[in-house]
Image (tube, rainbow, N blue to C red):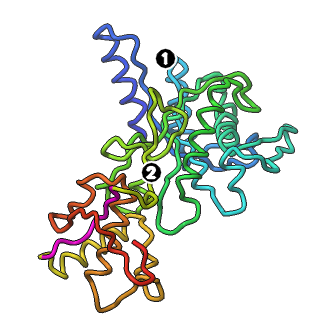
Amino acid sequence: MIRSLVPAMRTLHSALLAEGITDIKVTTAHSLAIMRSSIPPSAGRFRPGFAKHVLGPMLKFLKETRAPFMVNPYPYFGYNGKNVNFLLFRPSRGLYDRYTKLTYTNQFDALMDAVYSAMMALGYGDVDIAVGETGWPSVCDGWDACSVANAQSYNGQLVKHLATGKGTPLMPNRSFETYIFALFNENQKPGPIAERNWGLFQPDFTPVYDSGIMRNGQRVAPTTPAAPAGGQKWCVPKADASNAALQANINYVCSQGVDCRPIQPGGVCYDPNNVRALATYAMNAYYQANGRHDFNCDFSHTGVITTMNPSHDNCKI
């Protein structure tokens, strides 16, 4: 089926031309699984089978139609705990390519140049490159790669880096049309927590962080409880909420990246015989972390907002 991809692209292009539409380009996005090698960047090569039967013919078509080759570089997937500065455009030792004598200051440029080298090896270094998607999740399943700070750093520095127009070491002064994944967090998306937290905004349009694209005085909403002050609110269980419903609320909240350690064994709010107390902490933590909107305390009609602080003993809620 994959060998039918380029013929399908040609058919679509022909259909557009038949309708007199000449300003829409036909391309398709690729993950970097198409790469056989990418380190050092100058040694970047496509996987042989793809190169011969798909990518070669595709690049020929893209050159003919002046459309870009689209790739999805994700430095995030190369995170190992030791290279975080290199991935996030921060000062680091960089990556030295012994063949070109060039030093890379960030992983994004290194990945882009690896793709470029692979295109050059097939004779299509003059085809433009576009970035179909790239980004960084702000929350995931306990992995230290994921944080609002890291996501803001990657996307924010990426925007600044691209805005300079200086290109990459192998492609100086070239610009790349780039799309950040994603505009919104997908709170109903199945799978790991990270899959729901790539967005710049929450589903209710609340900014998760400012990546440098905020306009007209937009501000990021607080994601942690505000300091005690008049009018402060908390989310607590309704009096008639069943234990089963409250346990379901706990399970849901703790699957959304909220810090549930205080209500786990050994935590300051842990009370194994009091589901209501555990749910109070969990539901309020979710409410506070997601902008403190009334709908963040609904929990299928089992939550209610109160102005009475439910903290008790050493458990600060």
Question: What's the distance in space between the residues labelled 1 and 2, CA to CA?
Answer: 47 Å
Residue stretch in magenta: 231-239
Which is nearer the eye, 209 or 52?
A: 209
Side of 288 where 175 appears, left or right: right
Which is nearer the eye, 71 or 255?
A: 255
Residue 93, how many percent across, how many down?
A: 82, 50
| Residue pictured at 68% horizontal, 55% vertical | 84
Q: Nearer the viewer, mark 1 or mark 2?
A: 2
Which amino acid, by three-letter code, is at mark 1? Thr
- The image shows residue 201, relative to residue 171, as above or below, that is below
Side of 247 where 239 appears, left or right: left
- Quadrant where the C terminus is found in the figure: bottom left
Q: Which mark is residue 87?
A: none
Q: Is residue 43 magenta?
A: no
Which secondary structure lies at badge 2?
loop
**Picture quarter containing residue 44?**
top right
| Residue pictured at 60% horizontal, 23% vertical | 127
Residue that badge 1 annotates:
65
- The image shows residue 130, relative to residue 72, as above or below, that is above
Which is nearer the eye, 273 or 311?
A: 311
Side of 267 where 36 appears, left or right: right
- The image shows residue 43, relative to residue 163, as above or below, that is below
Residue 114, how many percent across, how many down?
A: 68, 40
Residue that badge 2 annotates:
222
